[in-house]
Amino acid sequence: MSRPFPGSEQSSPASAPAEGAGARECLQCSVRHLSVCSALSCDEVQALEDITVSQPVPLGTTLARTGEPRTYVYTVTEGALRLVRTLADGRRQVSGFVLPGDYVGLSGSDHHRYDIEAIADSRVCRVQVTQMRDVRLRHPHLERKLLQRACQELDAAQDNALALARLQPPERLADFLLRLAAREAQLGQVGNRVSLPMGRSDIADHLGLTMETVSRTFTKLRQQGLIALPHLNVVEILDFAGLQKLASDDLG
């Protein structure tokens, strides 16, 4: 899967991008096995297709802004998004990155809690919140899948909070790279190459570090023989066991 590398400061107006004709190939979707709609049978997929719009989200587009009414839920099918919150003092916190197969909309709030921004040319399947609620009521196994996804996201958030509280910069970055590698394996990508659709400043704002520290830490991991950096947006993991040991040293 190829994802273009953007500059993290690039942005565009929040106007709605052009829409596709609709999601009509759900059963052939390459990320269906990772998405919540995998809970639906072949016959039931049609019900979801009927209310789904396939929407391109070009690089730099803001899909939704903090505080806006939560009108739609989304499943990412291509590219990558970031979830951003601006703190009261003006600092930016990147809460997470949304990759193919991820579902955006697991929230008890009626309003968006983050800005949702495209960090690569992306595409999402978009469904109105009210229509998705109706589908969930008709298909309880989809509701169970969403609950499972919510539990997974809670576990991931707790793990990330623990890492930020206890790990030093090399350990944080090692943990981050291993999580990306695991996700690419789920997508069927083989080998040790990990794509980085996010910029260094995005990684810094996600891991609670400065961009300079992130850059120095990449260099340190390379010098230790744990990774190679053939390209700015590609990491080759040379020593999985070493990287795993580093990431778990303070969490054992």
Image (cartoon, rainbow, N blue to C red):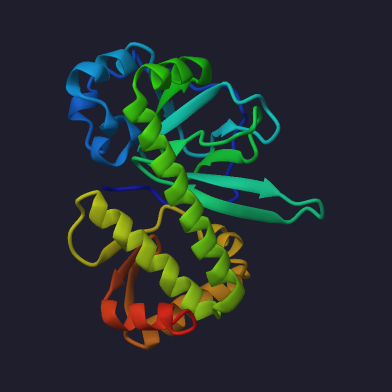
Q: Residue at x 42, y 77 (%)?
A: 247
With respect to residue 69, does 103 lie above or below? below
> Can residue 184 be seen?
yes
Tell me the residue at 58%/70% (across/down).
Answer: 164
For the C terminus, give its image quadrant. Answer: bottom left
Q: What is the number of callouts on the image? A: 0
Q: Quadrant of residue 57?
A: top left
When the figure is inspected, residue 139 is found, relative to residue 146, above or below; the finding is above
Instruction: State the residue at coordinates (54%, 34%).
Output: 61
- In the picture, measured across the screen, residue 134 lies left or right of residue 8, that is left
- Classify residue 204 by image quadrant: bottom right
Q: Is residue 6 visible?
A: no
**Which residue reaches farthest right?**
89
- State the residue at coordinates (47%, 20%): 133
For the residue pair 73 and 120, the one nearer the viewer reads as 73
From this viewpoint, which residue is outermost toward the bottom?
A: 224
Measured along the vertical axis of the image, is residue 201 above or below residue 88? below
Q: Position of residue 70 (x, y in %)?
A: 60, 26
Pick the residue in front: 179 or 250: 250
Q: Is residue 169 left or right of residue 112?
A: left
- Percent from the top left, x then y, of residue 152? 42, 50
- Residue 221 coordinates in the image, percent (x, y): 41, 81
User: In front here: 247 or 86?
Assistant: 247
Front residue (pair 105, 135)? 135
- Position of 161 compared to 225: left or right? right
